[in-house]
Amino acid sequence: MILGGLALILLALLGAPLFAVIAASALWGFSRSGVDLSAAAIEFYRIAEMPVLLAIPLFTFAGYLLSESHAPQRLVRLTRALIGWVPGGLAIVALAVCALFTAFTGASGVTIIALGALLYPAMLEDGYDESFSLGLVTTSGSLGLLFAPSLPLILYGVVAQQSSAGAGVSIDRLFLAGLLPGILMVVLLGGYSFWCNRRHRLPLSAFSWREVGTALWAAKWELPLPLVVLGGIYGGIFAVSEAAAVTAVYVLIVEVLILREIPLRNLPDIMRQSMVLVGGILLILGVSLASTNYLIDAGVPGRLFTLVRAHVSSPLTFLILLNLFLLVLGALLDIFSATVLVVPLILPVATGFGINPLHLGIIFLANMQIGYLTPPVGLNLFIAGYRFKQPITRIYWATIPFFLILLLCVLIITYWPALSLLLAGGQ
Amino acid sequence: MNRPLPQFLTTLDNLGRRLEDALLVLLLGGLIVLAALQIVQRDLFSGGFVWSDELLRLLVLWLALVGAVAASRDDNHINIDVLSRWLPVRLRLAARVIVDLFTCGLCGLLAWHGGRFVAGEREFASTVLGGLPAWPFEAIIPVGFGLIAWRYAVFTARDLIRLARGEVAA
């Protein structure tokens, strides 16, 4: 039993695809408890029984399209016109734009590639410290994870809904829950950037209404997008998956037909790239439905709760331990695998301690966001290293101050439930 | 990347890639059009086709598996891979053989049991979309896993050949 588990972990560490490792554990569990192995296929087929999954390919495709268009440039120009005159303004521009953009691209690393390449040279040119710029751009790659309609938020909702403890978690309430904690992160990081560069007076661009007007006009097509998504969902016009369809169609028409920034012949390749990512995520989700089903049948979440309860009595201690556990988890696993594997286990335990499942989702994802910046697997470190041709260790040191600020945000988010629950109304 | 392999495998691989690409474009295109149509219909005619919800969900299943097969062409699945970086090159190649063989065997197993599930559905004559037999729609599960198994079998063969020839890992 233990030997088999260790062998699977070893295979995972050697680079075996995680879906295969998860599927192996599910098949193994089924065969030990005498369940027909075709149960794994039946569980996998549940992918076709969750209407909300429709949102995942549609939002992902829209995000890829946006990153291939000139929307990032227009967004940077507009934000720069609005706040470029503040000391540290460009840094704050970077944070705000990346957060908005990541919400649509789902923190898959696309942000650093599409926006980092634009912002990093601009910051150096404006005389920002190299290490500061590198750290900021790397950190920004996963900022915005908590903003609708990010992929990790949707996936957490999907996984939570599979569990009886998370039955009340709807995706639209999750979107609301992430709003204030996400803003907290942007504000604290922005404050730090302002403080770091408070003496950095030099090439501050002068504020000009004319430039604001031109930039606004240039971005006229992209600006309504967050309104369409959020307004549509909370105005009760669209379900989440319908908002995804509207977004995909809208972005497709604007970037390909109206602005013509993406030639039609590039479209198949963008479709393929985005669907390869979607296939990878849904595959892991599908096999984890099987492994989770086995774990629940075997009563593992219940036993886990009894075990934790025997050693931990107060919710506060539980939350401290949870944070430590999630930080380590985020350093080892990517956000999608971590969500499908761990949420079904910790959700019943956390609700047992009286923690709201919406609040748990935000705690979970905020911790995972830090995982993007921690070695050994921190995705952003590698993408930034690759993109800006810098050694990983250098990028790691550059991100440490930002890492600490995000850690502070995680603590605030964890111990101040109202921040997550105020808008979502789940007190 | 399949240089040490016979020519027909490379040809087959290229053909497979093109087929997958075409299928992904068709499926995603269909998904977007159908999802958009559904909203239009709901708003204009207060009620779409009864089967469009179900078709959309089946399209997502197909996209998931065809996308996963396409991800396996370059061994592009989500993984951790922290140990192999520290291994000597020869040992790294040997570890690759083990990992690829494991993935191939596991997907083969999933394809086999998926096939049993589909055969069972055919026997029970389950239906989707208001009367169509369900099994051809579900057959993507064994077919998808079977194709992923095939890809990893090719990877295993390639790495074994490299190992035998004394080459280093790519």
Image (cartoon, coloured by chain):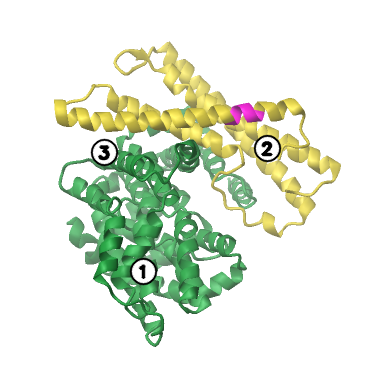
* Kind of residue sitting beneath label 2: Leu
Residue, disc 3 = A242
Residue, disc 2 = B101
- Please check the rendered image and state whether residue A395 is part of the magenta-colored stretch, yes or no: no
Mark sitting on residue A93? 1
Nearest the camera: A346 or A120? A120
Which chain identifier belongs to the green chain?
A
Within-10-Å neighbours for mark 3: few <14, some 14–19, many 20+ = many
**Badge 1: chain ID:** A
In the rendered image of this protein, does residue A268 appear above or below residue A338?
above
Judged left or right of residue A157, residue B135 is right
In the rendered image of this protein, does residue A230 appear above or below residue B8?
below
**Occupied quadrant, residue B26:** top left
Q: Which percent across, then down, holds residue A159?
A: 36, 45
Q: Which percent across, then down, holds residue A242?
A: 26, 38
**Which residue appears at 37% of the width and 15% of the height?**
B126
In the rendered image of this protein, does residue A346 appear above or below residue A404?
above
* Kind of residue sitting beneath label 3: Glu
Q: Which percent across, then down, holds residue A67?
A: 43, 51
Which chain identifier belongs to the yellow chain?
B
Task: Tell me if residue A35 can be seen.
Answer: no
Nearest the camera: A43 or A240? A240
Nearest the camera: B74 or A181? B74
Q: Secondary structure at mark 2?
A: helix
In the rendered image of this protein, does residue B90 appear above or below residue B51?
below
Question: Magenta region: which residues?
Answer: B13-17
Distance from Cα at disc 3 to Cα at disc 1: 31 Å
**Badge 3: chain ID:** A
